[in-house]
Image (cartoon, helix red, strand yellow):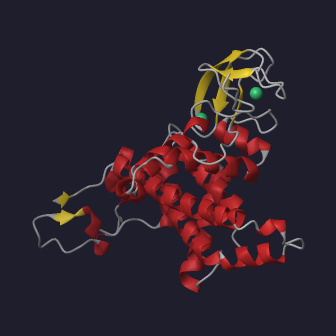
Amino acid sequence: MIIEVPTSSDFMTASLNSLNLAWSIIIQLHFELKNAKVSDWDSDGDVTDEYWQKSQAPLGNALILVQQGFELSLKSRIAAVSPYLLLSKDLRDWPASDKKDISFSDFRTIDSADLIKLHNSISADQLEPAFIERFDLIRKRRNQIIHHGKDRRPIQITELLEAILTCVARLAPSTRWMKQRSEYKNSDHFSVAYSSDHVSDELCSEAAAVIDLLGAAKLNFFFGFDKKARRYYCPSCARYSEADPYRTAHLRPNSSKSRTLFCMACDEIHEIQRQACAHPECKSNVISMDGTCLTCWDDQ
Ligand SMILES: [Zn+2]
Ligand SMILES: [Zn+2]
């Protein structure tokens, strides 16, 4: 009998872990360059180019994790129908049946290249050509790294961030990515060893980085965030920020009468009150419910 059969949710947990780890690698590389303030003196961009050249190995690892995330998410959806569909159909690939119980992990599973075909054969929700193309591209680039040591063309951080967000939006649509980041970081090894006090601050800087890196259409599609809207401090996130808080929120709806603010970092809607800020140099009238100006952070 086949024992230790993984469930759809086991595959999804593993997928989200891979995607989270890839995201952390990518964001960390972005932060290191920013914290070193290289752009202040690297006017011709040579050092920045060299930095990304030297970052290709960790970015290659991130790409492998992204491919793994796609693969595990597809397996999760197939396993929701039946995990046994994932086993190789060729009996010659099966382990010897001289034992009473055989673990699922001892069986050969179908090749990554066949996952889309299997998925679309059994699911009413057909994956569309653009998604299939993206999955194939990531899979081929991953194979290039595994079999030839590195990818033929440089890996860009924005394409990896977009690949992660596409995978989640299409294969795990109930997952809200910033909530997922919060959950992941609140229970990771750092939070166990120290505390999770740093998480809110880190999520704000992640959100600020993603706002800078992605275009308006992608931000709207993946996060419902309006890149062109005026930005405010989040009454919740900015309160827990240790350093300079980031402006990660905008009015939603984006109008002069609006009384609600959407924050990308915490992915929440916050009520606000409309009253003129008491600071003489601030013209804002967007104030938190407990009386802090969300433009200059002055207590009223
Ligand atoms: Zn917030
Ligand atoms: Zn103010």
Image-based side of 192 in relation to 119, left or right? left
Q: Position of residue 284 (x, y in %)?
A: 80, 24
* Residue positioned 12% across, 73% down in the render: 98
Whether residue 53 can be seen here? yes
Q: Quadrant of the N terminus?
A: bottom left
- Depth check: 239 or 217 in front? 239
Q: Number of labelled discs?
A: 0
Image-based side of 73 in relation to 95, left or right? right
- Depth check: 84 or 215 in front? 215
Residue 93 image-quadrant placement: bottom left
* Residue positioned 36% across, 58% down in the render: 193
Q: Quadrant of ligand 2?
A: top right
- Depth check: 16 or 248 in front? 248
Q: Position of residue 69 (x, y in %)?
A: 50, 58
Image-based side of 206 in relation to 227, left or right? left
Q: Position of residue 126 (x, y in %)?
A: 56, 44
Above or below residue 150? Residue 260 is above
Residue 34 image-quadrant placement: bottom right
Q: Position of residue 298 (x, y in %)?
A: 70, 29
- Depth check: 148 or 190 in front? 190
Above or below residue 210? Residue 86 is below
Q: Quadrant of the C terminus?
A: top right
Residue furthest to the front in view is 280
Residue furthest to the right in view is 44
Whether residue 152 can be seen here? no
